Amino acid sequence: MLYIGFSLMGIGIIWYIVHTVIYNRALRKHNPEIFDESRRQRYTGKRNKKVPVVVTKGQTPAWIMSFGLPLIPLFLVGVVITFVALIVDVFW
């Protein structure tokens, strides 16, 4: 049972990384000006304390946003299963 919990947590972490990569690629493809300002600041040496707020509704396809929905519950279920398995192993 402990292996199932660790596996679910690992799958959740990998899923998060894959979703982030896909999301950033879609943003770069559909809205490249988001990343231009940070690139410009990096090369000029000026750091701006302002954080640009970007509304991305409609900028990324719905399947990319839907792809990221199950990762947090999956990770949390893995944590709960691992915790329960550790409690069972210690007390029984």
Image (cartoon, rainbow, N blue to C red):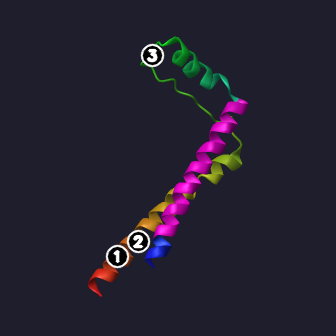
- What's the magenta region? 6-30
Answer above or below: position of 91 versus 41: below
> Hey, what amino acid is under mark 1?
Leu
- The quarter of the picture where residue 85 lies is bottom left
Quadrant of the snapshot with the N terminus: bottom left
Q: Which residue lies at the image location 70% right of the left edge and 49% below the top edge? A: 63
Q: Mark 2 points at which residue?
A: 82
Seen at 47% across and 12% down, the residue is: 46
Q: Verify CB contact (< 8 Å) between mark 1 and mark 2.
A: yes
Give the amino acid at mark 3: Asn
Q: Earlier in the sequence, mark 1 or mark 3?
A: 3
Type of the residue with mark 2: Thr
The mark nearer the N terminus, 2 or 3, is: 3
Q: Say which residue label 3 marks.
A: 48
SS class, disc 3: loop
Instruction: State which quadrant residue 69 falls in.
Output: bottom right
| Rendering coords of residue 92 (x, y %) | 30, 88
Q: Cβ–Cβ below 8 Å for labels 1 and 3?
A: no
Q: How crowded is mark 3: few (under 14 residues within 10 Å), some or many (20 or more)?
A: few
Spot the residue most to the left: 91
